[in-house]
Image (cartoon, helix red, strand yellow):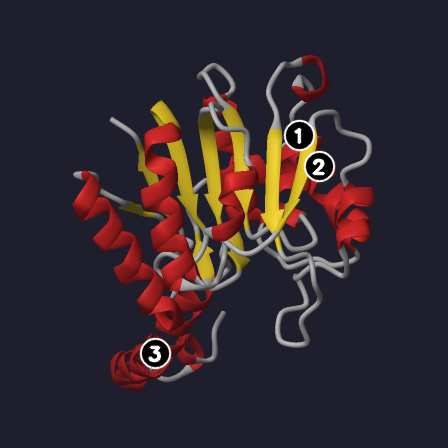
Amino acid sequence: MSLVERLPKVIRPPARLARDVLQYPFKKLGKCLARCRFKYRESALATNFICSFLEDQNFEAAYQKAVRATGLDPNIRFRVHQAIWAASVARNLEGDFLELGTGRGFIMLSVLESLDWWNSSDKNMYLVDLFSPSETYPTYAESFEATRASFSKFTRVNLVKGRVPDCLGELPDKSLFSFIHIDLNAAEPEYEAMIALWPRLCRGGIILLDDYAFPNRRDQHEAANKAMRLLGQKILTLAGGQGVIVKS
């Protein structure tokens, strides 16, 4: 029996009312805290929606292999999930894979580790970067040699060292691309790359923009929108801040 029910009958009703009034905000707070136990919470994204990829042993194994290979964990599982999805769709499309702004290679290492078909396919992957370290961005490459070593177990992975768009001429002249991941952290090179590479993106091909909707990357956001307006395309904003374009 509760303390309230032990009181004389005449004062039980007001005592119950007082109890309920006092408990109400705490009950609301409890419900609020329960809603804050997000199923996914990383890299400025929190959600209670179903994230079944987090329960995929192959996904987590691929992610952890990228952590070990690069020596860092940027906590970007949702972004990696999106890149793996794009690569899986692009598997059946004509064209190679291309990344602009590889750094240590975390995203594409995760992708390749998850694709059990890569080494037996005929696709090529081109990784473009200056491959030089940065005190500001720990995900930047330690060196060309270090990034190349991280990808050594995978066939047909080609590193292209240079500044975009100048180095794009080093890509094979007639090659098409089915998946392009862009993470240059710079608006003008990303704009020029999208314009230059659009004719070489196959129909149905995917461009994944890493920083598209980041609040501190508005210049990249506007540059991408400008490029797609010129090309008659639309960009889908993803919940994690990325942007995706599917060539129609």
What is the quadrant of residue 211 in the picture? bottom left
Instruction: Determine the residue positioned at 56% across, 52% down.
Output: 101
Instruction: Determine the residue positioned at 53% across, 36% down.
Output: 98
Q: Amino acid at mark 3?
A: Pro
Q: Amino acid at mark 2?
A: Ala
Q: Secondary structure at mark 3?
A: helix
Residue under pointer 1: 114
**Tag 1: Cα neighbours inside 10 Å, few (<14), some, or many (≥20)?**
many
Q: Secondary structure at mark 2?
A: helix
Residues at marks 1 and 3, CA–CA distance in whole angstroms: 47 Å
Which quadrant would the C terminus be assigned to in this image?
top left
In the rendered image, is residue 29 in sight? yes
79 left or right of 133? left
User: Is 6 located above or below residue 75 in the figure?
Assistant: below
Q: Nearer the viewer, residue 68 or 135?
A: 135
Circles 1 and 2: CB atoms closer than 8 Å: yes
> Which mark is first along the chain, 3 or 1?
3
**Tag 3: Cα neighbours inside 10 Å, few (<14), some, or many (≥20)?**
few
Q: What percent of the width, then of the height, locates residue 25?
A: 34, 78
> Which mark is first along the chain, 2 or 3?
3
Q: Nearer the viewer, residue 62 or 70?
A: 70
Residue under pointer 3: 25
User: Is 209 located above or below residue 245 in the figure?
Assistant: below
In the rendered image, is residue 57 in sight? no
Instruction: Determine the residue positioned at 77% across, 44% down.
Output: 148
Residues at marks 3 and 2, CA–CA distance in whole angstroms: 44 Å
Residue under pointer 2: 62
